[in-house]
Image (tube, coloured by chain):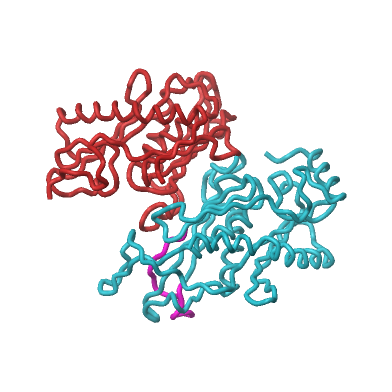
C-alpha cells in the first residue's frame, strides 16, 4: 500500500540536502543486472534487475500482412503487464493504464530511434512481413519499472534470432531457430526517467520514492555519433515541471547516459 | 517406430534435472522457483489478507485463490496474453491441489493469493507451478498439514514414464500418449490433484500411481532442501 505522509516528508526533506534514504545521491542508479536467454522458446529474452525491481521480457516473431501505409516494412507490438505477482497493490485483470503507458513509451523509444531496420523485416512487399511481439512482465516492482522494461526490451531484441521460415509453404517453423540476428542499427535507445519530488529531482526511485513523486519525465535517448539524440519523451504526474527543471534533467540525462550506458552496452554485447 | 527409449535418454522413472529455490520475489510474503528441465515456473504468495468481494467471505474459513499465467513467449508459437479457459482451469485445479493441506480455518474471511508465472514451457507446466506454489506457501509461513508435490506420469505407447516432455506428450505411434498429472501429499500420500488425457487400462493406472508416488517422494526432497535455504540447480 502507499506509504504514509510522514515518510514522504522524510524523503523530500533529505532530498533537499541531496540525500536519499538508501545512501544514494539523486542521480545515482541502483545496481543494474542483465541476463539474456532466460526463456528458450522465445526468439529473444532478457531479465533486467534494477535493485529489487525485476522485469522479464520476451520477443516472439510471426509473419503477417503489412500495414497498407507501410507495405514494405515489418511491424512491432509491445505489451506490458503488472501481474499480481509483482506486488501487493496489483490485481489481476487486463493491463491497466499504468502498464499501457509503460508499453507505449517503450514502443516509441524503439520505434523512433531507428533502432530497427523495418525494411529488412519485409518478406514480400504488400503481402508478408515479420512482426516483432515484445511482451514485458514485471516480476517484482520496487520502482523504475519503466526504465527496466525499456532496457529489457532492447536487450531481448539484441539477442534475438529469426525463427526458421519455410518459403515454399510460406509459414514460420515455430520452435526452430536460425542464427540470423534481427536487422538492428547502432541507434540503440536507452531510457532514463526523472522524478520530481518536493525538494528536488532524482532518478531510479525505489517504490517509496516513486510513491512520493509528484511528476516524472522520461527520456529515451540514443547516441549513434557523438551527439545525444532524444527519441521519445513522456511527462507523467499531476504537477507541472518548469523549463528550468527540464533543462537540468536534459543535461543530467546526457551525463547519466555517458556514465552507465557503455558498461551496459558491453554486457549486452557479451551475450551475443 | 516403437517407443523403447526416451528422446532425452532418461530412464523411464527418471525426473528431468531440477532447479529450485525460494525467495525469488522480494515483495511477496513467500515465493519460489521450480523447474523440471526446460519447464520453469515461479510462484508468489500474498496473504492471508482481507477477502474482496465481500460476498465470497466465509466466516469459518479462508480461501486460496490461484492465478496460473503462461507468458506469451514461454511457448514456441506466441500465446495470447491474459486469462484463457485453459489457464482458468489450471488455476482451479491448483487451488484444489493446495487447499487440502492448508488449515483454512485459521484464516476466516481471508484470502491467500497464489500467483504462478510460467516463464518457459516444455510440458508439465501445471506440475512445476503447483510445486513452486506449495513451496511459496510454506515460505510465506502459512500453516500446512503436509507438503504437496506434483509430477506428470505418462503412458507413452505402452510404457509408463515419469515427468514427460513435449516430444513425449505429442507421441502418436503405438498406443499414443496418455498424460496423467498427479499431486500427492507428503506424509499420507493422498492425491489432491489428478487429471488424465488419453487411454489407459485400470491395471496400468495402478502402475502410474506407484510411479507418481516414487517421483513425488524425490520431488519432496528437493522442495524440503530448497525450503531450508539451499539453491538447487541441476540444469546448466
Q: Is residue A251 left or right of residue B11?
A: right
Quarter location, residue B184:
top left
Where's residue A48, x and y in %? 57, 53
Seen at 47% across and 21% down, the residue is: B144
Seen at 24% across and 46% down, the residue is: B168
Q: For residue A81, say whether it is visible.
A: no
Where's residue B181, x and y in %? 30, 35
Quarter location, residue A169:
bottom left
In this picture, is A148 found above or below A250? above
Seen at 78% across and 43% down, the residue is: A21
Examine the structure image and report whether residue A79 is included in the region drawn in magenta.
no
- Chain B's colour is red
Q: Is residue B109 left or right of residue A126?
A: right
Q: In this view, does B26 lie to the left or right of B212?
A: right
In this picture, is B211 found above or below A87? above
In this picture, is B149 found above or below A41? above
Give the residues in magenta. Answer: A58-74
Seen at 84% across and 45% down, the residue is: A14
- Chain coloured cyan in the rendered structure: A
Where's residue A120, x and y in %? 44, 77
Q: For residue A172, say whether it is visible.
A: yes
Amino acid at each position: 500500500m502507499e506509504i504514509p505522509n510522514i515518510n514522504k516528508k522524510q524523503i523530500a526533506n533529505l532530498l533537499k540536502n541531496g540525500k536519499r534514504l538508501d545512501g544514494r545521491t539523486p542521480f545515482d542508479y541502483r545496481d543494474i543486472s542483465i541476463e539474456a536467454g532466460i526463456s528458450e522458446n522465445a526468439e529473444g529474452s532478457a531479465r533486467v534487475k534494477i535493485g529489487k525491481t525485476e522485469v522479464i521480457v520476451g520477443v516472439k516473431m510471426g509473419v503477417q500482412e503489412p500495414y497498407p501505409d507501410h507495405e514494405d516494412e515489418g511491424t512491432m507490438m509491445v505489451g506490458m503487464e503488472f501481474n499480481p505477482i509483482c506486488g501487493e497493490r496489483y490485481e489481476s485483470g487486463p493491463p491497466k493504464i499504468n502498464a499501457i503507458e509503460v508499453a507505449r513509451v517503450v514502443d516509441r523509444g524503439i520505434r523512433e530511434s531507428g533502432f530497427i531496420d523495418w525494411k529488412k523485416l519485409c518478406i514480400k512487399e504488400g503481402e508478408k512481413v515479420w512482426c516483432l511481439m515484445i511482451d514485458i512482465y514485471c516480476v517484482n516492482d520496487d520502482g523504475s519499472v519503466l526504465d527496466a522494461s525499456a532496457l529489457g526490451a532492447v536487450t531481448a531484441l539484441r539477442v534475438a534470432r529469426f525463427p526458421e521460415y519455410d518459403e515454399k509453404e510460406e509459414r514460420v517453423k515455430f520452435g526452430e531457430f536460425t542464427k540470423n540476428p534481427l536487422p538492428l542499427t547502432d541507434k540503440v535507445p536507452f531510457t532514463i526517467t526523472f522524478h520530481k519530488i518536493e525538494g528536488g529531482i532524482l532518478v531510479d526511485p525505489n517504490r517509496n520514492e516513486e510513491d512520493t513523486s509528484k511528476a516524472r519525465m522520461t527520456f529515451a535517448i540514443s547516441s549513434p555519433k557523438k551527439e545525444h539524440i532524444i527519441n521519445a519523451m513522456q511527462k507523467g504526474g499531476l504537477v507541472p515541471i518548469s523549463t528550468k527543471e527540464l533543462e537540468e534533467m536534459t543535461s543530467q540525462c546526457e551525463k547519466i547516459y555517458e556514465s552507465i550506458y557503455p558498461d551496459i552496452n558491453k554486457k549486452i554485447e557479451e551475450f551475443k | 517406430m516403437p517407443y523403447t527409449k526416451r528422446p532425452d535418454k532418461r530412464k523411464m522413472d527418471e525426473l528431468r534435472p531440477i532447479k529450485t529455490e525460494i525467495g525469488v520475489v522480494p515483495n511477496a510474503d513467500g515465493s519460489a522457483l521450480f523447474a523440471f528441465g526446460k519447464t520453469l515456473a515461479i510462484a508468489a504468495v500474498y496473504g492471508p489478507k482481507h477477502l474482496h468481494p465481500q460476498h465470497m467471505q466465509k466466516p469459518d474459513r479462508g480461501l486460496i485463490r490461484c492465478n496460473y499465467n503462461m507468458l506469451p513467449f514461454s511457448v514456441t508459437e506466441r500465446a495470447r496474453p491474459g486469462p484463457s479457459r485453459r489457464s482458468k482451469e489450471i488455476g482451479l485445479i491448483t487451488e484444489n491441489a493446495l487447499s487440502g493441506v492448508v488449515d483454512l480455518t485459521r484464516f476466516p474471511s481471508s484470502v491467500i493469493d497464489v500467483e504462478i508465472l510460467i516463464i518457459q514451457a516444455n510440458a508439465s507446466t501445471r506440475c512445476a507451478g503447483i510445486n513452486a506454489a506449495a513451496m511459496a506457501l510454506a515460505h510465506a509461513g502459512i500453516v500446512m498439514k503436509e507438503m504437496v508435490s506434483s509430477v506428470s506420469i505418462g503412458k507413452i505407447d505402452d510404457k509408463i514414464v515419469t515427468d514427460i516432455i513435449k516430444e513425449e506428450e505429442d507421441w502418436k505411434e503405438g498406443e499414443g500418449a496418455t498424460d496423467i498429472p498427479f499431486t500427492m501429499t507428503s506424509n499420507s500420500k493422498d492425491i489432491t490433484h489428478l487429471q488424465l488425457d488419453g487411454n489407459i487400462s485400470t491395471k496400468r493406472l495402478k502402475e502410474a500411481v506407484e510411479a507418481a508416488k516414487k517421483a513425488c517422494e524425490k520431488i519432496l526432497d528437493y522442495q524440503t532442501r530448497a525450503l531450508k535455504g539451499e539453491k538447487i540447480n541441476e540444469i546448466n
